[in-house]
Amino acid sequence: MQVLVKKYIRKESTSGIILIFATILALLLNNSIFSEFYTSFLQTEIVFKVGHILDIQKPLILWINDGLMAIFFLLIGLEIKRELIAGHLSTPSKIALPAIAALGGMVVPALIYFIFNYGDDYALKGWAIPTATDIAFALGILSLLGRRIPASLKIFLMALAIFDDLGAILIIALFYTNDLSFHAISLAGICIILLILLNRFKVTRLGFYILLGVLLWIFVLKSGVHATLAGIIVAFTIPLHAIDEKRKIISPVKSLQHHIHYWVAFYILPLFAFVNAGVDLSYTSLDKLSNPTSMGIIFGLFIGKQLGVFLFSYLAIKYNIAKFPRCTNWAQLYGVSVLTGIGFTMSLFIDSLAFENSNVFFFTDKLAILIGSFASGIMGYLILRFVKSRRGCSI
C-alpha cells in the first residue's frame, strides 16, 4: 500500500510543480505586452453545433471550466469511490479523523469569510472560496520533504483532500446552480438511469459509460446545474470490480482512473490554472486588496483552514473519536493543517462560479487566493522542514 501511495504522491508533486509554472506564465503574460493576446485567447469563441438539435457556443475559458474540469471531477469521483469501497476510507476508524478534519477545514474558513463580508449579499456568494484544498500543491510540498514526513501523515492528507473535494462537490450542486430547465434535467435523469442499468448488468466496456457521460454532460450543462457534476455521477456508476469476457476479474474504475490521471495532472489542471490565474495586477493595489472579500479569502485560507483542520482533529483525537496518525507528532499534524490552506485551483474554480465578473473586485479576489495559498504553502513547508519526527519510530 505504501508503494502505491508513494507513486501517487510522486505524480501529484510533479503536477504541482507544473501548476506553479502555469500560474507564473499566466501572470507574466497578462502583465506584459502580451496581455491583449492572453485575453483574446481566453475569449476565443468555440461553437459546437449539430443541425437544429444542439448548439453550444462558449468562450475558450468556459469550455475549460465547464468541459475539461468535468473530466477532473470524473477522476475525483473515481478516487472517492475506490477509497470508500476498498481503500483508506473503507472503515469507520479510517474515515473518522480525515472526515472530521475536513469538516473543520470547511466550516471555520466559511465562518471567517462570512464575518468579513456580513451584510454584503453579492460578496457572500463567495463564502465557499476559502473552503477548498488543492491536493496537487499540498502533496507536492510534502514530497519536497522526503522521508521527514511519515506515510501515515501523507495518507491523512490524501484522505482529508478526498472529503474536502466531496464537500466542494456538494457545495457546487447546492449553491452554485442557475435557473433550472426541467426538460434538460429530465433528459439528464434518463442518462443517469441508463448508467445505473449498465452498472447493474456489470457492463465493463468503458465506451458505453463515456458515451452516456458526454450526453449527460450536455443535458446537465443545459439544465442550469453546473456541468462538472456530470463527471461525478458517471464515476459513481462505473463498476469497481467486474468479470470480463475471459472470466477474469477486472476493475473498470481503476482502468479509467489510470488512463485519465495523466491527462488531468499534466494538461487539464495546468491549463485551468493558466486561464484562471492570470490576474491583471495593473488594476490592483494595497488599498483595493484590503476590501472585505479579499481579506475574507486570505484569512479564510491562511488562518481558517489551519485552525479548522487542527482544532477539529485535536478534539476528535482528545475525545477518542479518531486515532492519532502513526509515527506523527502534534507539530507535524499542525504543519499539514497549514498546508490545507493551499486552495489554488479548487478555490479559483469556485471563485469563477461565485463571481462571473471579477472586475467588481478589480481581480483582487483571485489575487487573494494566490496570496492565501502561497502563504499557507510556505509556512506549512517551513514548519514541517524544521520539526523533528518522533524518535524510535520507523516511517
Image (spheres, rainbow, N blue to C red):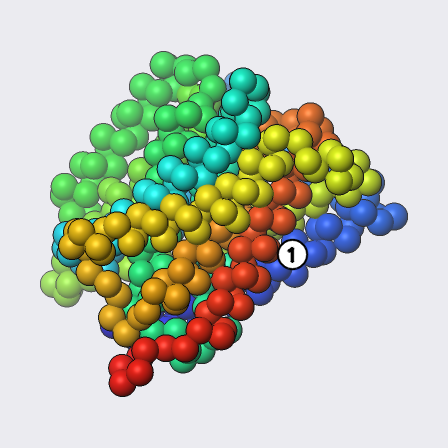
Count of numbered circles in the view = 1
Residue for point 34% across, 74% down: 150
Q: Position of residue 251 (x, y in %)?
A: 22, 59
Residue for point 37% across, 77% down: 389
Residue for point 55% across, 30% down: 116
Mark yes or no: residue 210 visible.
no
Residue extending furthest toward the right = 33
Q: Is residue 196 left or right of residue 380?
A: left
Q: Position of residue 186 (x, y in %)?
A: 31, 19
Mark yes or no: residue 273 visible.
yes
Q: Camera-side residue: 3 or 210? A: 3
Above or below, 223 against 102 in this view is above
Q: Position of residue 79 (x, y in %)?
A: 31, 54
Q: Camera-side residue: 279 or 70? A: 279
Residue extending furthest toward the left = 247
Q: Is residue 35 left or right of residue 371?
A: right
Q: In the rendered image, which residue does mark 1 sit on?
A: 22
Tell me the element at label 1.
helix
Above or below, 303 against 252 in this view is above
The quadrant of the image that shows the N terminus is bottom left
Q: Position of residue 209 (x, y in %)?
A: 31, 43
Q: Camera-side residue: 79 or 40? A: 79
In which quarter of the view is residue 395 placed?
A: bottom left
**Which residue type carries mark 1?**
Ala
Residue for point 50% across, 41% down: 300
In which quarter of the view is residue 337 placed?
A: bottom left
Residue extending furthest toward the front = 318
Residue extending furthest toward the bottom = 392
Q: Residues within 10 Å of mark 1 (few under 14, many from 20)?
A: many
